[in-house]
């Protein structure tokens, strides 16, 4: 069975019933990076996804019934974000924990998730989208730049080098 294109995926928001498949997708994505780059694999749990649902919404891409992409969108500033390294904003939206199924990467699905996040920001009257990416070969900084984000600064949080991006 071949995967459908990103244009035929259905985008919406996860519910608590989606916590386990979202956690599995995030684990698969981080394991794929660990195998490719030798970086640590982050373990994502259903409990962690449920926590994310309490503080924001999780945008999901579905191919038939399977969740093949996700990104958490929240108005609450994440712990690793230093607002001093961004332009002034009255209402920023934070994009966190973006993941695309390893077999769907490099198909345009990540770009579609960004397009949907932009639409969500507009819908919520947000004036910026902010995020961070690992400052490492396995980080997604280059992807975010190709999607129109600009680098606003760099920081180290808990011994992890980060690059901040804004749209």
Image (cartoon, rainbow, N blue to C red):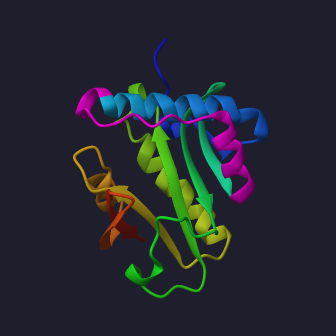
Instruction: Look at the picture and state if 14 lies above or below 144.
Output: above
Q: Position of residue 166 (x, y in %)?
A: 41, 71
The quadrant holding residue 30 is top left
Q: Residue at x 42, y 49 (%)?
A: 111
Q: Residue furthest top?
A: 1
Q: Residue furthest front?
A: 158
The quadrant holding residue 65 is top right
Res 31 seen here: yes
Q: Is residue 63 left or right of residue 51?
A: left
Q: Is residue 42 magenta?
A: yes
Q: Nearer the viewer, residue 95 or 47?
A: 47
Q: Is residue 32 magenta?
A: no
- What secondary structure prevails in the magenta region? helix
Instruction: Look at the picture and state if 139 lies above or below 17.
Output: below
Q: Residue at x 67, y 68 (%)?
A: 123
Q: Position of residue 74 (x, y in %)?
A: 63, 62
Q: Position of residue 142 (x, y in %)?
A: 26, 55
Q: Residue at x 42, y 85 (%)?
A: 87
Instruction: Look at the picture and state if 32 lies above or below 15.
Output: above
Q: Is residue 137 left or right of residue 105?
A: left
Q: Nearer the viewer, residue 101 or 34?
A: 34
Instruction: Look at the picture and state if 134 lies above or below 50.
Output: below
Give the quadrant of the C terminus. Answer: bottom left
Res 149 seen here: no
Q: Position of residue 141 (x, y in %)?
A: 30, 56
Q: Residue at x 22, y 46 (%)?
A: 137
Magenta part of the protein: which range?
A: 35-55
Marks counted in the figure total: 0
């Amino acid at each position: 069975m071949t995967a459908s294109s990103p244009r035929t995926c259905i985008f919406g928001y996860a519910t608590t019933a989606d916590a386990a498949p979202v956690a599995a997708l995030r684990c698969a994505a981080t394991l794929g990076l660990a195998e490719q780059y030798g970086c640590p694999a982050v373990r994502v749990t259903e409990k962690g996804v449920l926590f994310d649902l309490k503080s924001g919404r999780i945008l999901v891409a579905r191919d038939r019934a399977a969740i093949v992409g996700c990104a958490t969108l929240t108005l609450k500033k994440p712990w690793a974000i230093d607002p001093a390294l961004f332009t002034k904003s009255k209402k920023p939206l934070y994009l966190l924990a973006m993941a695309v199924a390893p077999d769907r990467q490099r198909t345009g699905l990540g770009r579609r998730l960004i397009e949907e996040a932009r639409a969500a920001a507009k819908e919520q009257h947000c004036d910026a989208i902010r995020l961070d990416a690992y400052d490492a070969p396995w980080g997604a900084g280059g992807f975010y730049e190709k999607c129109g984000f600009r680098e606003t600064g760099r920081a180290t949080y808990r011994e992890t080098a980060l690059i901040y991006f804004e749209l």
